[in-house]
Image (cartoon, rainbow, N blue to C red):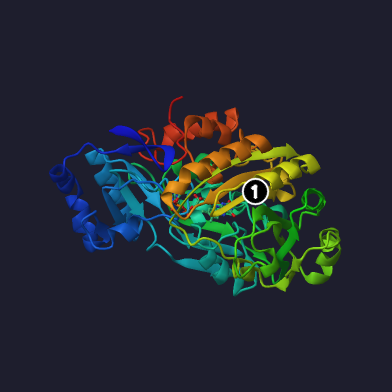
Protein backbone atom coordinates (compact mmCIF):
# COMPACT_ATOMS: atom_id res chain seq x y z
CA UNK A 1 0.00 0.00 0.00
CA UNK A 2 1.33 3.42 -0.89
CA UNK A 3 0.51 6.72 0.75
CA UNK A 4 0.02 9.96 -1.09
CA UNK A 5 -0.98 13.54 -0.65
CA UNK A 6 -3.32 15.14 -3.15
CA UNK A 7 -3.88 18.72 -4.24
CA UNK A 8 -7.18 18.82 -2.38
CA UNK A 9 -6.03 17.86 1.07
CA UNK A 10 -3.05 16.90 3.13
CA UNK A 11 -4.94 13.94 4.59
CA UNK A 12 -3.20 10.64 4.37
CA UNK A 13 -4.80 8.47 1.70
CA UNK A 14 -3.92 4.98 0.66
CA UNK A 15 -3.86 3.40 -2.75
CA UNK A 16 -3.87 -0.20 -3.77
CA UNK A 17 -0.97 -1.66 -5.70
CA UNK A 18 -3.16 -4.27 -7.44
CA UNK A 19 -3.08 -4.49 -11.22
CA UNK A 20 -6.46 -3.92 -12.95
CA UNK A 21 -6.80 -7.67 -13.57
CA UNK A 22 -5.95 -8.56 -9.97
CA UNK A 23 -8.40 -5.91 -8.79
CA UNK A 24 -11.19 -7.40 -10.92
CA UNK A 25 -10.45 -10.85 -9.51
CA UNK A 26 -10.39 -9.50 -5.95
CA UNK A 27 -13.72 -7.72 -6.40
CA UNK A 28 -15.45 -10.66 -8.12
CA UNK A 29 -17.17 -12.03 -4.96
CA UNK A 30 -18.50 -8.57 -4.21
CA UNK A 31 -19.66 -8.07 -7.80
CA UNK A 32 -21.50 -11.40 -7.48
CA UNK A 33 -23.21 -10.24 -4.29
CA UNK A 34 -24.05 -6.65 -5.33
CA UNK A 35 -24.49 -6.85 -9.10
CA UNK A 36 -24.75 -3.35 -10.56
CA UNK A 37 -24.50 -1.87 -7.10
CA UNK A 38 -20.73 -2.34 -7.33
CA UNK A 39 -19.42 0.54 -9.39
CA UNK A 40 -15.94 0.91 -10.84
CA UNK A 41 -14.59 3.92 -12.75
CA UNK A 42 -15.86 2.27 -15.96
CA UNK A 43 -19.47 2.06 -14.66
CA UNK A 44 -22.23 4.52 -15.52
CA UNK A 45 -22.91 6.73 -12.54
CA UNK A 46 -19.48 6.18 -10.96
CA UNK A 47 -18.57 9.88 -10.91
CA UNK A 48 -21.79 10.76 -9.06
CA UNK A 49 -21.40 7.83 -6.67
CA UNK A 50 -17.86 8.88 -5.80
CA UNK A 51 -18.54 12.65 -5.54
CA UNK A 52 -18.48 14.35 -2.14
CA UNK A 53 -19.69 17.72 -0.83
CA UNK A 54 -16.28 19.34 -0.49
CA UNK A 55 -14.71 19.40 -3.93
CA UNK A 56 -11.10 20.00 -4.81
CA UNK A 57 -9.52 16.63 -4.09
CA UNK A 58 -8.40 14.65 -7.11
CA UNK A 59 -8.69 11.09 -5.88
CA UNK A 60 -10.43 8.14 -7.52
CA UNK A 61 -11.57 5.11 -5.54
CA UNK A 62 -11.08 1.69 -7.14
CA UNK A 63 -14.74 0.87 -6.55
CA UNK A 64 -17.87 2.05 -4.75
CA UNK A 65 -20.00 -0.66 -3.12
CA UNK A 66 -23.60 0.47 -2.61
CA UNK A 67 -24.32 -1.87 0.29
CA UNK A 68 -27.85 -2.42 1.62
CA UNK A 69 -27.43 -4.25 4.94
CA UNK A 70 -25.01 -5.53 7.56
CA UNK A 71 -24.38 -8.78 5.66
CA UNK A 72 -23.33 -6.90 2.53
CA UNK A 73 -21.12 -4.64 4.65
CA UNK A 74 -19.43 -7.76 6.09
CA UNK A 75 -18.96 -9.22 2.59
CA UNK A 76 -17.38 -5.98 1.36
CA UNK A 77 -15.06 -5.83 4.35
CA UNK A 78 -13.97 -9.46 3.83
CA UNK A 79 -13.23 -8.83 0.15
CA UNK A 80 -11.24 -5.70 0.99
CA UNK A 81 -9.34 -7.47 3.74
CA UNK A 82 -8.44 -10.47 1.56
CA UNK A 83 -7.27 -8.24 -1.29
CA UNK A 84 -5.40 -5.80 0.95
CA UNK A 85 -7.65 -3.04 -0.37
CA UNK A 86 -7.97 0.09 1.75
CA UNK A 87 -11.53 0.79 2.91
CA UNK A 88 -13.54 3.98 3.35
CA UNK A 89 -17.10 4.55 4.50
CA UNK A 90 -19.43 7.06 2.85
CA UNK A 91 -22.75 8.26 4.22
CA UNK A 92 -23.68 11.93 3.74
CA UNK A 93 -20.41 12.72 1.94
CA UNK A 94 -19.98 15.98 3.88
CA UNK A 95 -16.71 15.23 5.59
CA UNK A 96 -14.37 18.19 5.34
CA UNK A 97 -11.29 15.96 5.11
CA UNK A 98 -13.04 13.97 2.34
CA UNK A 99 -12.35 10.66 4.08
CA UNK A 100 -14.50 8.74 1.62
CA UNK A 101 -12.51 9.85 -1.42
CA UNK A 102 -9.98 7.08 -1.03
CA UNK A 103 -7.59 6.77 -3.96
CA UNK A 104 -7.56 3.17 -5.16
CA UNK A 105 -9.70 2.02 -2.24
CA UNK A 106 -13.05 0.37 -1.77
CA UNK A 107 -15.74 2.83 -0.66
CA UNK A 108 -18.69 1.38 1.23
CA UNK A 109 -21.52 3.71 0.24
CA UNK A 110 -24.28 3.47 2.87
CA UNK A 111 -26.80 5.77 1.19
CA UNK A 112 -29.22 2.95 0.38
CA UNK A 113 -29.43 2.24 4.12
CA UNK A 114 -31.80 5.13 4.71
CA UNK A 115 -34.48 3.72 7.04
CA UNK A 116 -35.73 5.79 10.01
CA UNK A 117 -37.97 4.53 12.80
CA UNK A 118 -39.47 6.83 15.41
CA UNK A 119 -40.61 4.99 18.55
CA UNK A 120 -42.70 7.68 20.17
CA UNK A 121 -43.60 5.68 23.27
CA UNK A 122 -40.02 4.71 24.05
CA UNK A 123 -38.65 8.16 23.11
CA UNK A 124 -36.13 6.47 20.85
CA UNK A 125 -35.25 7.13 17.21
CA UNK A 126 -33.45 4.55 15.07
CA UNK A 127 -31.60 5.43 11.89
CA UNK A 128 -29.76 3.17 9.48
CA UNK A 129 -26.14 4.04 8.79
CA UNK A 130 -26.76 6.08 5.63
CA UNK A 131 -29.59 8.30 6.88
CA UNK A 132 -29.20 12.06 6.41
CA UNK A 133 -29.78 14.21 9.49
CA UNK A 134 -32.53 16.17 7.72
CA UNK A 135 -34.61 13.07 6.95
CA UNK A 136 -34.53 11.98 10.59
CA UNK A 137 -35.34 15.53 11.78
CA UNK A 138 -38.44 15.64 9.57
CA UNK A 139 -39.58 12.13 10.63
CA UNK A 140 -39.16 12.96 14.34
CA UNK A 141 -40.72 16.40 13.88
CA UNK A 142 -43.96 14.82 12.67
CA UNK A 143 -44.35 13.57 16.26
CA UNK A 144 -43.26 16.86 17.88
CA UNK A 145 -39.99 15.14 18.85
CA UNK A 146 -36.36 15.98 18.19
CA UNK A 147 -32.77 14.85 18.55
CA UNK A 148 -30.13 17.52 18.08
CA UNK A 149 -27.63 17.25 15.22
CA UNK A 150 -25.96 20.15 13.41
CA UNK A 151 -27.16 23.00 11.22
CA UNK A 152 -27.39 21.21 7.86
CA UNK A 153 -29.91 18.56 6.86
CA UNK A 154 -27.72 17.05 4.13
CA UNK A 155 -25.02 15.90 6.55
CA UNK A 156 -24.88 12.17 7.31
CA UNK A 157 -26.50 11.55 10.69
CA UNK A 158 -24.08 8.83 11.78
CA UNK A 159 -21.03 10.57 10.32
CA UNK A 160 -21.88 13.64 12.37
CA UNK A 161 -22.82 11.63 15.48
CA UNK A 162 -19.58 9.64 15.52
CA UNK A 163 -17.52 12.84 15.76
CA UNK A 164 -19.63 14.78 18.27
CA UNK A 165 -22.50 16.69 16.70
CA UNK A 166 -22.82 20.36 17.61
CA UNK A 167 -25.86 22.28 16.44
CA UNK A 168 -29.11 24.00 17.21
CA UNK A 169 -29.92 22.00 20.36
CA UNK A 170 -26.46 21.30 21.80
CA UNK A 171 -26.52 23.72 24.72
CA UNK A 172 -30.05 22.65 25.63
CA UNK A 173 -29.84 18.86 25.10
CA UNK A 174 -26.12 18.11 24.75
CA UNK A 175 -24.10 17.09 21.72
CA UNK A 176 -25.44 14.34 19.47
CA UNK A 177 -23.00 11.92 21.16
CA UNK A 178 -24.72 12.67 24.46
CA UNK A 179 -27.96 11.37 22.98
CA UNK A 180 -26.66 8.20 21.34
CA UNK A 181 -28.17 5.23 23.18
CA UNK A 182 -26.61 2.42 21.18
CA UNK A 183 -25.49 1.18 17.79
CA UNK A 184 -25.27 -1.89 15.63
CA UNK A 185 -21.74 -2.18 14.31
CA UNK A 186 -20.07 -4.41 11.72
CA UNK A 187 -16.53 -4.97 12.92
CA UNK A 188 -13.41 -5.44 10.77
CA UNK A 189 -13.69 -9.23 11.12
CA UNK A 190 -17.31 -9.20 9.89
CA UNK A 191 -18.96 -9.77 13.27
CA UNK A 192 -22.12 -7.74 13.86
CA UNK A 193 -22.23 -6.47 17.44
CA UNK A 194 -24.30 -4.18 19.58
CA UNK A 195 -22.64 -1.32 21.46
CA UNK A 196 -24.45 0.34 24.34
CA UNK A 197 -24.08 0.97 28.06
CA UNK A 198 -24.39 -2.78 28.80
CA UNK A 199 -23.00 -4.55 25.72
CA UNK A 200 -19.47 -3.68 24.60
CA UNK A 201 -19.46 -0.48 26.70
CA UNK A 202 -15.88 0.30 25.67
CA UNK A 203 -16.93 0.37 22.01
CA UNK A 204 -20.00 2.44 22.92
CA UNK A 205 -17.75 4.98 24.62
CA UNK A 206 -15.34 5.12 21.67
CA UNK A 207 -18.04 5.50 19.02
CA UNK A 208 -19.23 8.69 20.71
CA UNK A 209 -16.50 10.99 19.41
CA UNK A 210 -13.94 8.54 18.01
CA UNK A 211 -15.30 8.69 14.45
CA UNK A 212 -15.35 5.81 11.99
CA UNK A 213 -12.29 4.11 13.51
CA UNK A 214 -13.99 1.07 15.00
CA UNK A 215 -16.42 -0.39 12.51
CA UNK A 216 -19.32 0.35 10.19
CA UNK A 217 -22.40 1.54 12.06
CA UNK A 218 -25.39 0.04 10.32
CA UNK A 219 -27.95 1.36 12.81
CA UNK A 220 -27.79 4.04 15.47
CA UNK A 221 -30.26 4.59 18.30
CA UNK A 222 -30.89 8.08 19.64
CA UNK A 223 -32.77 9.71 22.50
CA UNK A 224 -35.78 11.75 21.37
CA UNK A 225 -37.17 14.67 23.34
CA UNK A 226 -40.49 16.43 23.23
CA UNK A 227 -39.99 19.66 21.30
CA UNK A 228 -43.30 20.90 19.89
CA UNK A 229 -41.83 24.30 18.96
CA UNK A 230 -38.62 26.26 19.05
CA UNK A 231 -38.06 30.00 18.71
CA UNK A 232 -35.38 30.50 16.13
CA UNK A 233 -34.23 31.98 12.87
CA UNK A 234 -31.72 34.52 11.67
CA UNK A 235 -30.45 37.91 12.82
CA UNK A 236 -28.18 40.07 10.65
CA UNK A 237 -26.19 43.12 11.71
CA UNK A 238 -23.67 45.26 9.82
CA UNK A 239 -20.27 43.94 10.88
CA UNK A 240 -19.19 46.66 13.30
CA UNK A 241 -16.59 45.20 15.73
CA UNK A 242 -18.53 46.51 18.76
CA UNK A 243 -21.69 44.83 17.48
CA UNK A 244 -19.89 41.54 16.86
CA UNK A 245 -18.36 41.59 20.35
CA UNK A 246 -21.81 42.42 21.78
CA UNK A 247 -23.45 39.54 19.92
CA UNK A 248 -20.80 37.09 21.12
CA UNK A 249 -21.09 38.27 24.72
CA UNK A 250 -24.89 37.94 24.60
CA UNK A 251 -24.64 34.38 23.29
CA UNK A 252 -21.95 33.35 25.78
CA UNK A 253 -24.07 34.64 28.66
CA UNK A 254 -27.40 33.28 27.36
CA UNK A 255 -29.20 30.46 29.17
CA UNK A 256 -28.58 26.90 28.00
CA UNK A 257 -31.85 26.75 26.03
CA UNK A 258 -30.23 29.00 23.41
CA UNK A 259 -27.87 27.41 20.88
CA UNK A 260 -26.69 28.66 17.54
CA UNK A 261 -23.84 30.12 15.62
CA UNK A 262 -22.47 33.35 14.27
CA UNK A 263 -20.94 33.84 10.83
CA UNK A 264 -18.83 36.88 10.01
CA UNK A 265 -18.70 37.23 6.25
CA UNK A 266 -19.07 39.49 3.27
CA UNK A 267 -22.71 38.85 2.39
CA UNK A 268 -23.13 36.99 -0.89
CA UNK A 269 -26.20 37.88 -3.00
CA UNK A 270 -28.27 35.08 -1.51
CA UNK A 271 -32.05 35.53 -1.35
CA UNK A 272 -32.06 34.57 2.34
CA UNK A 273 -29.93 37.65 3.13
CA UNK A 274 -31.38 41.18 3.09
CA UNK A 275 -30.63 42.84 -0.30
CA UNK A 276 -29.14 45.94 1.35
CA UNK A 277 -26.52 43.73 3.02
CA UNK A 278 -25.28 42.10 -0.20
CA UNK A 279 -21.55 42.71 -0.74
CA UNK A 280 -21.10 44.19 2.74
CA UNK A 281 -19.48 42.61 5.80
CA UNK A 282 -22.17 41.26 8.09
CA UNK A 283 -22.63 39.40 11.35
CA UNK A 284 -25.18 36.66 10.74
CA UNK A 285 -26.49 34.71 13.73
CA UNK A 286 -28.55 31.55 13.28
CA UNK A 287 -30.15 30.91 16.63
CA UNK A 288 -32.49 28.40 18.20
CA UNK A 289 -34.19 28.65 21.60
CA UNK A 290 -35.54 25.24 22.65
CA UNK A 291 -38.96 26.46 23.69
CA UNK A 292 -41.90 28.76 22.85
CA UNK A 293 -41.71 32.46 21.96
CA UNK A 294 -43.02 33.79 25.27
CA UNK A 295 -40.10 32.15 27.09
CA UNK A 296 -37.59 33.29 24.46
CA UNK A 297 -38.45 36.98 24.49
CA UNK A 298 -36.19 37.97 27.39
CA UNK A 299 -33.40 35.74 26.10
CA UNK A 300 -33.37 37.48 22.73
CA UNK A 301 -33.66 41.01 24.19
CA UNK A 302 -29.86 41.62 24.38
CA UNK A 303 -29.47 40.61 20.71
CA UNK A 304 -32.39 42.76 19.58
CA UNK A 305 -30.93 45.68 21.56
CA UNK A 306 -28.00 45.59 19.12
CA UNK A 307 -30.40 46.71 16.34
CA UNK A 308 -30.30 43.90 13.77
CA UNK A 309 -31.11 44.93 10.18
CA UNK A 310 -32.78 41.56 9.66
CA UNK A 311 -34.74 39.60 12.27
CA UNK A 312 -36.61 36.47 11.19
CA UNK A 313 -36.54 34.89 14.63
CA UNK A 314 -39.89 33.52 15.69
CA UNK A 315 -41.77 30.47 16.92
CA UNK A 316 -41.46 27.61 14.43
CA UNK A 317 -41.39 23.82 14.31
CA UNK A 318 -37.84 22.61 14.85
CA UNK A 319 -37.44 21.10 11.31
CA UNK A 320 -38.02 24.60 9.89
CA UNK A 321 -34.63 25.60 11.28
CA UNK A 322 -33.21 23.58 8.39
CA UNK A 323 -35.28 25.19 5.64
CA UNK A 324 -34.44 28.33 3.72
CA UNK A 325 -30.86 28.71 4.86
CA UNK A 326 -29.05 28.23 1.58
CA UNK A 327 -25.39 28.20 0.73
CA UNK A 328 -23.21 26.28 -1.67
CA UNK A 329 -24.75 23.02 -2.86
CA UNK A 330 -21.45 21.21 -2.68
CA UNK A 331 -18.86 19.96 -5.09
CA UNK A 332 -17.00 23.26 -4.76
CA UNK A 333 -13.37 23.24 -3.67
CA UNK A 334 -13.08 24.37 -0.09
CA UNK A 335 -11.13 24.21 3.11
CA UNK A 336 -11.33 25.06 6.81
CA UNK A 337 -9.29 25.48 9.94
CA UNK A 338 -10.87 24.98 13.32
CA UNK A 339 -10.14 25.24 17.02
CA UNK A 340 -11.64 25.84 20.43
CA UNK A 341 -11.24 29.26 22.07
CA UNK A 342 -11.48 30.21 25.72
CA UNK A 343 -13.46 28.55 28.45
CA UNK A 344 -16.62 29.11 30.49
CA UNK A 345 -18.75 32.10 29.48
CA UNK A 346 -15.79 33.98 27.95
CA UNK A 347 -16.41 35.85 24.71
CA UNK A 348 -13.92 37.36 22.25
CA UNK A 349 -13.37 41.10 22.87
CA UNK A 350 -13.61 44.06 20.52
CA UNK A 351 -9.95 43.79 19.43
CA UNK A 352 -10.56 40.22 18.32
CA UNK A 353 -13.79 41.28 16.63
CA UNK A 354 -11.94 44.05 14.77
CA UNK A 355 -9.43 41.50 13.48
CA UNK A 356 -12.23 39.12 12.41
CA UNK A 357 -14.09 41.82 10.48
CA UNK A 358 -10.83 43.01 8.89
CA UNK A 359 -10.03 39.46 7.82
CA UNK A 360 -13.34 38.80 6.07
CA UNK A 361 -12.98 42.08 4.18
CA UNK A 362 -9.82 40.60 2.65
CA UNK A 363 -11.36 37.23 1.80
CA UNK A 364 -10.99 35.86 -1.73
CA UNK A 365 -14.07 35.40 -3.97
CA UNK A 366 -16.50 32.61 -3.05
CA UNK A 367 -18.02 32.03 0.34
CA UNK A 368 -15.56 32.63 3.15
CA UNK A 369 -16.48 33.13 6.79
CA UNK A 370 -15.39 33.07 10.37
CA UNK A 371 -17.89 30.77 12.10
CA UNK A 372 -18.32 30.81 15.88
CA UNK A 373 -20.43 28.38 17.89
CA UNK A 374 -20.99 28.92 21.59
CA UNK A 375 -20.32 25.82 23.70
CA UNK A 376 -21.34 25.64 27.38
CA UNK A 377 -24.76 24.62 28.67
CA UNK A 378 -25.41 20.87 28.48
CA UNK A 379 -22.18 20.35 26.48
CA UNK A 380 -20.16 21.45 29.50
CA UNK A 381 -22.41 19.70 32.03
CA UNK A 382 -21.47 16.20 30.81
CA UNK A 383 -18.41 14.52 32.31
CA UNK A 384 -15.56 14.70 29.72
CA UNK A 385 -14.74 11.04 30.48
CA UNK A 386 -18.25 9.90 29.47
CA UNK A 387 -17.61 10.09 25.74
CA UNK A 388 -14.63 10.24 23.40
CA UNK A 389 -15.60 13.86 22.64
CA UNK A 390 -13.73 15.41 25.56
CA UNK A 391 -13.09 19.13 24.89
CA UNK A 392 -16.13 20.14 26.90
CA UNK A 393 -14.79 23.14 28.81
CA UNK A 394 -14.26 25.29 25.70
CA UNK A 395 -16.23 28.52 25.38
CA UNK A 396 -16.29 28.66 21.56
CA UNK A 397 -15.73 26.45 18.60
CA UNK A 398 -14.31 28.71 15.90
CA UNK A 399 -13.85 27.69 12.27
CA UNK A 400 -12.33 29.76 9.49
CA UNK A 401 -13.83 28.28 6.36
CA UNK A 402 -14.49 28.88 2.71
CA UNK A 403 -15.45 27.49 -0.66
CA UNK A 404 -14.38 28.79 -4.03
CA UNK A 405 -16.06 28.35 -7.43
CA UNK A 406 -12.85 27.37 -9.25
CA UNK A 407 -10.14 24.88 -8.33
CA UNK A 408 -7.44 27.44 -9.07
CA UNK A 409 -8.91 29.65 -6.36
CA UNK A 410 -8.15 27.04 -3.72
CA UNK A 411 -4.53 28.03 -3.09
CA UNK A 412 -5.54 31.67 -2.43
CA UNK A 413 -8.43 30.56 -0.24
CA UNK A 414 -6.08 28.36 1.79
CA UNK A 415 -3.66 31.26 2.28
CA UNK A 416 -6.53 33.40 3.54
CA UNK A 417 -7.77 30.67 5.89
CA UNK A 418 -4.31 30.08 7.33
CA UNK A 419 -3.48 33.73 7.89
CA UNK A 420 -6.93 34.48 9.33
CA UNK A 421 -6.75 31.50 11.66
CA UNK A 422 -3.27 32.56 12.81
CA UNK A 423 -4.44 36.13 13.41
CA UNK A 424 -7.49 34.99 15.39
CA UNK A 425 -5.66 32.31 17.37
CA UNK A 426 -7.67 29.48 15.80
CA UNK A 427 -5.85 26.17 15.89
CA UNK A 428 -4.59 23.61 18.36
CA UNK A 429 -7.25 21.55 20.12
CA UNK A 430 -10.22 21.24 17.83
CA UNK A 431 -13.35 19.42 16.72
CA UNK A 432 -12.63 16.36 14.62
CA UNK A 433 -15.65 16.86 12.33
CA UNK A 434 -14.53 20.33 11.26
CA UNK A 435 -10.92 19.39 10.48
CA UNK A 436 -10.13 19.45 6.77
CA UNK A 437 -6.86 17.59 7.21
CA UNK A 438 -6.23 14.35 9.03
CA UNK A 439 -2.62 14.37 10.15
CA UNK A 440 -1.32 12.75 13.35
CA UNK A 441 -1.17 16.25 14.83
CA UNK A 442 -4.86 16.75 13.99
CA UNK A 443 -5.70 13.51 15.80
CA UNK A 444 -3.76 14.70 18.87
CA UNK A 445 -5.59 18.03 18.68
CA UNK A 446 -8.95 16.26 18.52
CA UNK A 447 -8.37 14.12 21.59
CA UNK A 448 -6.71 14.90 24.92
CA UNK A 449 -3.87 12.48 25.73
CA UNK A 450 -5.85 10.26 28.10
CA UNK A 451 -8.78 10.05 25.66
CA UNK A 452 -6.46 9.10 22.80
CA UNK A 453 -4.77 6.42 24.89
CA UNK A 454 -8.18 4.95 25.73
CA UNK A 455 -9.26 5.12 22.08
CA UNK A 456 -6.12 3.19 21.08
CA UNK A 457 -7.01 0.47 23.59
CA UNK A 458 -10.46 0.12 22.06
CA UNK A 459 -8.92 0.14 18.57
CA UNK A 460 -6.62 -2.73 19.55
CA UNK A 461 -9.64 -4.70 20.78
CA UNK A 462 -11.94 -4.11 17.78
CA UNK A 463 -9.76 -3.24 14.77
CA UNK A 464 -6.20 -4.37 15.55
CA UNK A 465 -5.27 -4.47 11.85
CA UNK A 466 -6.49 -0.88 11.30
CA UNK A 467 -8.83 -1.75 8.43
CA UNK A 468 -10.76 1.44 9.22
CA UNK A 469 -7.96 3.92 8.55
CA UNK A 470 -9.58 6.46 6.24
CA UNK A 471 -10.65 8.82 8.99
CA UNK A 472 -8.92 10.81 11.71
CA UNK A 473 -7.05 7.64 12.33
CA UNK A 474 -6.57 6.32 15.84
CA UNK A 475 -3.81 3.83 15.13
CA UNK A 476 -3.69 0.72 17.34
CA UNK A 477 -0.13 1.61 18.41
CA UNK A 478 1.42 5.02 19.00
C1 LIG B 1 -22.04 22.11 5.03
C2 LIG B 1 -21.62 21.37 6.26
C3 LIG B 1 -22.26 21.63 7.45
C4 LIG B 1 -21.89 20.96 8.62
N1 LIG B 1 -22.52 21.27 9.79
C5 LIG B 1 -22.17 20.64 10.92
C6 LIG B 1 -22.77 20.98 12.15
O1 LIG B 1 -23.61 21.88 12.22
N2 LIG B 1 -22.39 20.33 13.26
C7 LIG B 1 -21.45 19.34 13.23
O2 LIG B 1 -21.17 18.78 14.29
N3 LIG B 1 -20.84 18.99 12.08
C8 LIG B 1 -21.18 19.62 10.93
N4 LIG B 1 -20.52 19.32 9.77
C9 LIG B 1 -19.43 18.34 9.80
C10 LIG B 1 -19.95 16.91 9.67
O3 LIG B 1 -20.46 16.48 10.90
C11 LIG B 1 -18.81 15.98 9.29
O4 LIG B 1 -18.27 16.43 8.08
C12 LIG B 1 -19.23 14.54 9.16
O5 LIG B 1 -18.07 13.72 9.01
C13 LIG B 1 -20.13 14.34 7.97
O6 LIG B 1 -20.62 13.03 7.90
P1 LIG B 1 -21.13 12.50 6.49
O7 LIG B 1 -21.71 11.15 6.71
O8 LIG B 1 -21.95 13.52 5.83
O9 LIG B 1 -19.77 12.42 5.68
P2 LIG B 1 -19.04 11.23 4.92
O10 LIG B 1 -17.93 11.92 4.20
O11 LIG B 1 -19.97 10.39 4.16
O12 LIG B 1 -18.47 10.37 6.10
C14 LIG B 1 -17.47 10.87 6.92
C15 LIG B 1 -16.81 9.80 7.73
O13 LIG B 1 -17.63 9.45 8.83
C16 LIG B 1 -17.53 8.07 9.10
N5 LIG B 1 -18.84 7.47 8.92
C17 LIG B 1 -19.94 8.03 8.37
N6 LIG B 1 -21.00 7.20 8.49
C18 LIG B 1 -20.53 6.09 9.10
C19 LIG B 1 -21.13 4.89 9.51
N7 LIG B 1 -22.41 4.66 9.33
N8 LIG B 1 -20.35 3.96 10.14
C20 LIG B 1 -19.04 4.19 10.33
N9 LIG B 1 -18.42 5.32 9.97
C21 LIG B 1 -19.17 6.26 9.36
C22 LIG B 1 -16.49 7.52 8.14
O14 LIG B 1 -15.22 7.57 8.71
C23 LIG B 1 -16.61 8.49 7.00
O15 LIG B 1 -15.47 8.51 6.18
C24 LIG B 1 -20.86 19.98 8.58
C25 LIG B 1 -20.20 19.72 7.37
C26 LIG B 1 -20.58 20.40 6.23
C27 LIG B 1 -19.83 20.14 4.95
* Image vertical order of residue 456 relative to residue 144, above or below: above
**Residue furthest top as drawn:** 478
Describe residue 418's horizontal placement relative to residue 1 as left or right. right
> Is residue 200 shown to the viewer in this render?
no
Near mark 1 (Cα within 10 A), the count class, few <14, some 14-19 or many ≥20, is: many
Locate residue 326: give its quadrant. Answer: bottom right
Rendered location of residue 160, percent (x, y): 53, 52
Comparing 46 with 422, the one in front is 422
Rendered location of residue 95, percent (x, y): 47, 49
Rendered location of residue 200, percent (x, y): 49, 43
Describe residue 173's horizontal placement relative to residue 73 as left or right. right
> Is residue 317 shown to the viewer in this render?
yes
Comparing 187 with 236, the one in front is 236
- Quarter of the image with the N terminus is top left
Residue marked by disc 1: 360
Secondary element type, mark 1: helix
Q: Residue at x 24, y 63 (%)?
A: 44
Q: Residue at x 37, y 56 (%)?
A: 51
Amino acid sequence: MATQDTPGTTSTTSTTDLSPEALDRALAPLAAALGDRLLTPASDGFADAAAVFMGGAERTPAAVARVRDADEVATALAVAHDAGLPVAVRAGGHNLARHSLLDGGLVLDLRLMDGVEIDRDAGVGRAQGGVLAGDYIVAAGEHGLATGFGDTGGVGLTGLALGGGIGYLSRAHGLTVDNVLGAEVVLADGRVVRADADENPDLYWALRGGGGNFGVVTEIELRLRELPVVTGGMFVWPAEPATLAGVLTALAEAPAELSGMVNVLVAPPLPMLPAEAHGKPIVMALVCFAGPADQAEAVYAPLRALAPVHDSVGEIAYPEMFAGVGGPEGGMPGDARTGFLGDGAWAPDEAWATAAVGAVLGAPPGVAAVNLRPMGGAIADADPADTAFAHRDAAWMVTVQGMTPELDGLAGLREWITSTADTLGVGGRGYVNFMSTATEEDVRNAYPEATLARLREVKRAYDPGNLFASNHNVTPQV
